């Protein structure tokens, strides 16, 4: 039986959430802070559990990126990854290198937009799935074309690229509420680097 290793990205592989960092990379810190301030009421309601996580993220994303050319957006994603390799936790860098050397099956399952996560993994043996942006006429609409890759959606997206679950052993790594379903689905689960099952 083969083994698949599934990793959350933000907070698990990286030390920080990449959404605000990416926005700051593209627009600068002052504009990022202003945009978050203008959407603070949605963020506050989300924190209270009164508004959906995915809808909140889409509102923030749309505020900044609606109407941007896809080509320009992807160029920002590539430059963001190139400038932020130090975001990886040292222990995760070591683990991912070992798995790459072993030619292990690695899937990164992220709630972040896949466009800026994928450039962090130029090795084609690493599969990256995440929240997808909607593009019409070569420009971002500000909406997502898939559900936010969070919670149970992480399991659905993993099965989309690795079906036939009984055929492989699943080892999963996560750090937050959005990873619980993925961790519960795994044979071996590491939550905040600690074995939970």
Image (spheres, rainbow, N blue to C red):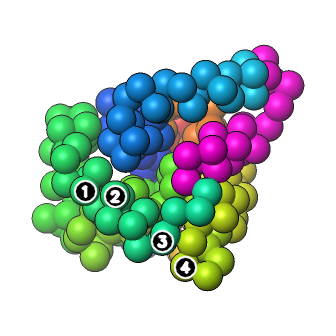
Left or right, 1 with respect to 66, comes to left
Residue at 63%, 44% (x, y): give it.
63
Labels 3 & 4 near each other (Cβ < 8 A): yes
Asked which secondary structure carries label 4, the reply is: loop
Answer with mark 1 or mark 4, whichever residue precedes in sequence. Answer: 1
Asked which secondary structure carries label 3, the reply is: helix
Q: Position of residue 123 (x, y in %)?
A: 23, 70
Q: CA distance from mark 3 to mark 2?
A: 10 Å
Q: Residue furthest bottom?
A: 137
Toward the viewer: 10 or 41?
41
Labels 2 & 1 near each other (Cβ < 8 A): yes
Q: CA distance from mark 3 to mark 1?
A: 14 Å
Q: Which residue is mark 1?
A: 79
Q: CA distance from mark 1 to mark 4?
A: 20 Å
Left or right, 166 with respect to 192, comes to right
Answer with mark 4 or mark 2, whichever residue precedes in sequence. Answer: 2
Asked which secondary structure carries label 2, the reply is: helix
Q: Which residue is mark 4?
A: 138
Q: Which residue is mark 3?
A: 70
Q: Residues within 10 Å of mark 2 (few under 14, many from 20)?
A: some
Residue at 59%, 62% (x, y): give it.
67
Q: Which mark is residue 76?
A: 2
Nearer mark to the viewer, of 1 and 4: 4
Residue 137 in which image quadrant = bottom right
Q: Which contiguous range is marked in magenta? A: 45-65
Answer with mark 3 or mark 4, whichever residue precedes in sequence. Answer: 3
Toward the viewer: 176 or 44?
44
């Amino acid at each position: 039986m083969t083994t698949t290793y599934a990793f959350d990205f933000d907070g698990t592989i990286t030390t920080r959430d990449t959404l605000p960092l990416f926005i700051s990379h593209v627009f600068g810190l002052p504009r990022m802070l202003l945009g978050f301030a203008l959407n603070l009421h949605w963020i506050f309601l989300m924190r209270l559990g009164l508004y959906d996580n995915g809808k909140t993220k889409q509102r923030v994303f749309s505020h900044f990126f609606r109407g941007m050319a896809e080509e320009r957006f992807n160029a920002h994603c590539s430059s963001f990854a190139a400038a932020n390799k130090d975001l990886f936790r040292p222990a995760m860098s070591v683990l991912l290198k070992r798995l790459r050397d072993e030619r292990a099956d690695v899937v990164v399952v992220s709630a972040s937009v896949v466009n800026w996560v994928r450039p962090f993994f130029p090795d084609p043996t690493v599969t990256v799935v995440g929240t997808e942006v909607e593009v019409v006429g070569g420009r971002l609409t500000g909406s997502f074309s898939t559900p936010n890759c969070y919670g149970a959606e992480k399991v659905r997206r993993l099965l989309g690229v690795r079906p036939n679950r009984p055929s492989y052993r699943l080892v999963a790594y996560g750090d937050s509420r959005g990873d619980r379903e993925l961790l519960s689905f795994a044979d071996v689960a590491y939550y905040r680097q600690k074995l939970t099952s």
